[in-house]
Image (cartoon, rainbow, N blue to C red):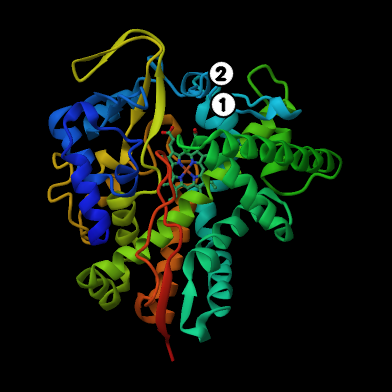
Amino acid sequence: MAGNDVEEKGRAAAQKSLDQVTLIDPDVIECPYHTYKKLREEAPVYKDPVAGFYIVSCYNDIMKVIKDTATFSSNVAEAVFPPGERNRAEEFGGYPSVPALITADPPKHKYYRNPINKVFSAARVEQMEPYIEQITHALIDDFIKDGYCEFVAQYTIPMPLMIIADQLGVPREDLPLFKEFSDALTTQVSGVANREQRIWAAKKNVEFQKYFVKVIEEKRVNPTDDIITDLINAQMENGEPMSVPELLSVLNILLAAGNETTTNSISKGILLLIQNPDQMKLVLDDLSLVENLTEEVLRFDGPVQGLMRVATRDAEIAGAPIPKGSVIMLRYASANRDEQHFPGSEAFDIRRRNAATHLAFGQGIHFCLGAMLARKEMNVTFRAVLTRMKNLRLAPGYPEPHHEPSIVLRGLKELHLAFDPAP
Ligand code: HEM
């Protein structure tokens, strides 16, 4: 639940006449759920008059679109950012981005995904638990005695960054660089970046490319046991290895997809517990609820609000005609509040039986590659925080938590916490 002011603005935005509803509205970005409800009830397939794309907001309709990869392509870059409204690495001397992994369609998609599937499998992630716990506790050790922390900067940003850097096989001292690289991609997909921000992001992307070209060259000579080496050794459908632009595109997605998302879902989970003391009490009394808490956080207010597809031919969704070339925004966060699938959907309920059927990780062939890892990172964190940081509350004297501006990702800018260190 958002704070009062934010909540009021979100409610007011949803009361506008339907033809004025847009996801680009800052009040909708801050508090979108009233608008999603209106769309599900009044126009489940709705053409956003400002953004220009079709928003699909109901659970079953989204599932149908996701499964039909021939009609609804994930290769959205050109359709979403027409020339003139984009700034790319190649303008600044970098490599062009290639549709890879999240933006690749069948049959090519599997050639990008197969070499890294095993790294993030449930079995491998299970083995990683002690290592994740070690990172978690070391970060908490740094601020536990203070009884205060800015949780986003001191915990939720560094934690997933360290883990993905280790998996890629790049040194932790470069974490500040990786954070910038990851922010650059987030800016590029935010849908609300101005020209100056887009140019900054494109230039950062060139820095990212230079950094990783060097790493790739080193690992070609001295292979190590990590994802980059696996990708270098992977074979595409023609038996050839991936090209450098392909490798860079896959690495860019891996670096960015696993950071901001996990950062945001962990901080949101802690805020939701503080805002819902009855749920906080439930989980404190029974820590075995942590796994379902994680699912409910992802369902209730997930970090990926929606992702796009482009129609490869004239099509139809829930009776609405969709012309060839149209961009479609699959609003996963709205599907996760769909009453037809989640009765009592507007309540944050950590005992909800079907919480794990949320679409926060998408579905189908693009189902989040890092879902098992993200879940583990959330579970380990929630257990550690609930055990070590008692009487958890918002630190007094700070403004109510706000979200970063983006129509795709949703995450808190800051989260100032006060707590009593457990004895
Ligand atoms: C709570 C955290 C996370 C959320 C909510 C999330 C969400 C998503 C979603 C919604 C998709 C589907 C894309 C689509 O429908 O087009 C996706 C794909 C993907 N995610 Fe995540 N993600 C999270 C964490 C991670 C982590 C930790 C990693 C990697 C370490 C990761 C890597 C990926 C990759 C590589 C894809 C593309 C998969 C493909 O296209 O085959 N994600 N994620």
Q: Nearer the viewer, residue 288 or 6?
A: 6
The extreme right residue here reads 221
Q: Which SS class for mark 1?
A: loop
383 versus 312 height, above or below: below
Above or below residue 206? Residue 127 is below
Q: Report which quarter residue 327 is drawn in.
A: top left
Residue beneath disc 2: 83
Near-viewer residue (276 or 66): 276
Q: Is residue 147 left or right of residue 11?
A: right
> Is 181 above or below relative to 53?
below
Residue marked by disc 1? 86
Q: Residue at x 58, y 68 (%)?
A: 135
Query: Cα distance, mark 1 to mark 2?
Result: 6 Å
Q: As shown in the figure, which amino acid type bears the numbered disc 1?
A: Arg
Task: List x then y, in percent, for residue 114.
Answer: 57, 33
Residue drawn at x 18%, y 16% as measured from the top left? 319
Please state which amino acid type lies under the numbered disc 2: Pro
